Image: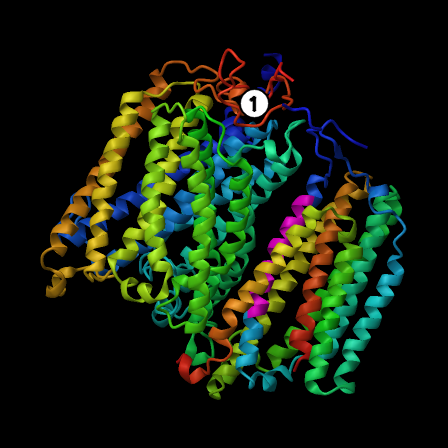
Amino acid sequence: MEQLTHHKKSFFSQYIFSTDHKVIGIQYFVTGMVMAAVGGFLAYVFRYNLAFPGAKIPFFGELSAQQYNEFITCHGMIMVLWVAMPILISALGNLIIPLQIGADDMAFPTLNMLSYWFFVVSCIVLLASFFVPGGASSGGWTLYPPLSANAYRNTNPDFWSALFSGNSMMILAVALEIVSMLMGGINFLVTSINMRAPGMTPFRVPILVWFLNIASLDFMFSVGPLIAGAVMLLLDNVIGTGFYDPARGGDPILFQHLFWFFGHPEVYVILLPSLGAMAEIISVFSRKPIFAYKTIVYMALISSVLAVMVWAHHQFVSGIDPRMATFFSVGTIIISIPFAGIFLSYMATLWGGSIRFSVPMIWALGFIGLFLIGGLTGLFLGSNSFDIYVHGTYFVIAHFHYTLFPIVFFGGFAAFYYWFPKFSGKTLNDTLGKIHFWLTFFSFNATFFVLFFNGLAGQHRRINDYAMFPSLMQEPYITFEKISTIGTIVLILSQFIFLYNFINSLIRGKKAENNPWNAATLEWQTQSPPPHGNFSVPPVVYNGPYDYSMPDRAEDFIPQNVQSEKK
Amino acid sequence: MNQSPHFVKIRAVPQGRLALWMLIAGEFVIFGGLIIGYILFRLRNPEWAEQAKHTNTLLGALNMLVLLTGSYVGVRAHMAAINNQVNKVVMWMSVSIGCGFLFLINKSIEYSREISHGFTFTSPKLQEAGNNIGSLFWSFYYIMTGLHAAHVLVGIIIFSAILIQARKGQNLHRVELGVMYWHMVDIIWIFLFPLLYIAK
Amino acid sequence: MEDTLGVVIPDPKTDYHGHLNYGKIYVWLLILFAVSLTSAFLFSHVAAIATVFVIAIIQAGLIARNFMHLKFEPVLIWIIAIAAVFCLVMFLYGMYIDITPVTREIAK
């Protein structure tokens, strides 16, 4: 208590420009949720337009073709870089890493704060780009030139209006976001390498911390070429160089390589933290040690090496050399082996466990079930002969959302429901959590499962108004489009249950116990919410993170910082 | 169950140095992306030899000499910092900053020479003459050397900030971090120099 | 020095073994630099370029190993350094065939 009064600070330095990792984590989470609301609204608007072309959209009005392009571009960018990254890497990493390794804060608290404010600036730059003349970036979320390089250049040749065009602002926002994530990633790595509690040996670190670190490493090594590529693209836009202009000796394929060299590892950067959170949740609620701890870690390391060898499978239809297409095809199929290993280990953990269907657990199980569909369709697409046929169709959209939506939202919500009592000190309403899960589960499947059929039947993506293409405007396409749109609306509406539950529990929720789930990892062995400095007594670690089902104890688990009596 | 010696023996790296190694690895990948892009285009466009003739090998070599010296002087400052010799730290670091400024002066002389010959970022003169391919060489030249020069500038700022504290004998361990950044800038130039000034 | 984790806490004085002859390495760097400058006049074009790049790699290695003290760093730092190089090699390998052999007429 004395310690707390010593650390008394003004509201401003305690909650706004805070250097405390917990506050920064919550800030990242809330900012990510706000951006998710923006991204979700964009999705609603263009999804509505696809099912009912030309109709007046409730809460928006009519959607022009230009706006449609802007909305899909910004929906993609926002959901990947401004929702998935801050929630799964920054928020989860900031909140969990110091607590799970028994540190009092991050290695570089000020750098941590700086990284958050860079992120806020990047959000502002991105949102501001909707309001500049010419509108936001509209060349697709991958920013491929020439669409992203000289559209504005042709109309506005002067420097400042080129700098404040949608494309340039999008590139600047991406650059700021990457800088912020790099600062965060280096911070995570240094914290987990250097600040572990006594006794926290590498193989006593929870899998989530391992995975967050592997993800940060992957991000750090793959993002460099994109930074170089973004600088070149910015110069193409602003002063008119020709790096990506074939007429000037440049090559747009160069940007595609620079982008996907980052873009593919990025999928694993997002996937790994989510999988790590699942490891914690599944082990706790099956009351079993995680199956094959070391194998899981090695599999993740292997996958992070393979991740930089498969990127060009996104470019099979962009005219890359067919000989390399075979190489990347094989690589893509090989990379499914480590992830299959991780998933089978999770299922083996469930097998024979005493499973408790609490809210975090059903989200985790939903994640595994749905991601399996995304992963398996990924194998189809990894084979270049199949990919060439479906790349331009809705099959790719459905596959992509079956991977990314479970990763970000099912994984994210599982983590949220699991760690909420720890960081707020309040308990969430279980019934509302379950209703939220089932509504989200069914509406998500309604939204995207039908798109597989549409895609295989040959319906093109990248078309804003199907009424202009009578062959695409017939049954069954149009019915499936409508089912998908209704699914989207229900999906978005069901998030209000979550919002209500979140706010209501914060205000009126029951006080949470320190360790409501009987978990063994260190973050549950301190108060809820943890005090400034995290632990009143610096912990010493004696056990592994998943020591459940211990027959010789009153409770069936041993916390990591308790020495077991039986030698 | 925890009988085995559960304390694995590892050698720790101080956290500042650890973070800096990661930053350096990250920077290498950024410059690596640029350099690889340049090499691939250079091999595709043999016509670039025509343009590469105009880069000034003498000034480039001088800059190489300046940076190598800066690196050596930096490592002396680092050793002085380890032995707590504040006066020597101040002396060697000032020389190192001087090397940085010398580099930038050389660079600006070089840039003004190129610009006066009509070779700019977009080289409108070359484009008007129909030599679009040639103008791309200069785009690569300026983006690579420009990004490197920006790193030299950042290095000078970092060194100055460290020097202000080191003069009072504070935070001497930071000298090492600044110097490591300086070596990184040097290594990048070691690769840029043959690419742009020698392999013509 | 060891703390409770069993981690050997580095002490800069013993860490670097203190006796590296930096002056010698500096002289070596200058000699290599001189060789790379003169190689253009001594060898044929291709051989000169090959020499110059081999020398660049040796110089970078000398600076990293001695001036940046990479040779005293634990295996962790080596892994970081090698991972960066590995990523770049993969990048070059994957991109080469799509850029260099493609003539500009095809690219258009």
Magenta region's main secondary structure? helix
Q: In x, y percent, where is residue A286?
A: 41, 26
User: Where does residue B122 sit, x and y in percent of width and height?
Assistant: 51, 76
Is residue A386 visible in this depiction of the protein?
yes
Q: Which residue is mark 1?
A: A9
Q: Is residue A465 above or below residue A557?
A: below
* Left or right side of B172 for A294: left
Q: Is residue A17 visible?
A: no
Chain identity of mark 1: A
Q: From the viewer's perspective, is B77 left or right of C57?
A: right
Q: Is residue B30 magenta?
A: yes
Quadrant for residue A317, please give it.
bottom left
The residue positioned 20% from the left and 61% from the top of the image is: A459
Q: Quadrant of residue A214?
A: top right
Q: Residue at x 47, y 86 (%)?
A: B128
Front residue of A403 and B48: A403
Q: Position of residue A57 (x, y in %)?
A: 16, 47
Span highlighted in magenta in the image: B18-36
Q: Quadrant of residue A516?
A: top left
| Disc 1 packing (10 Å; few <14; some 14–19; many ≥20) | few
- Is residue A278 rendered to the left or right of residue B163? left
Q: Secondary structure at mark 1?
A: loop
Q: Amino acid at mark 1?
A: Lys
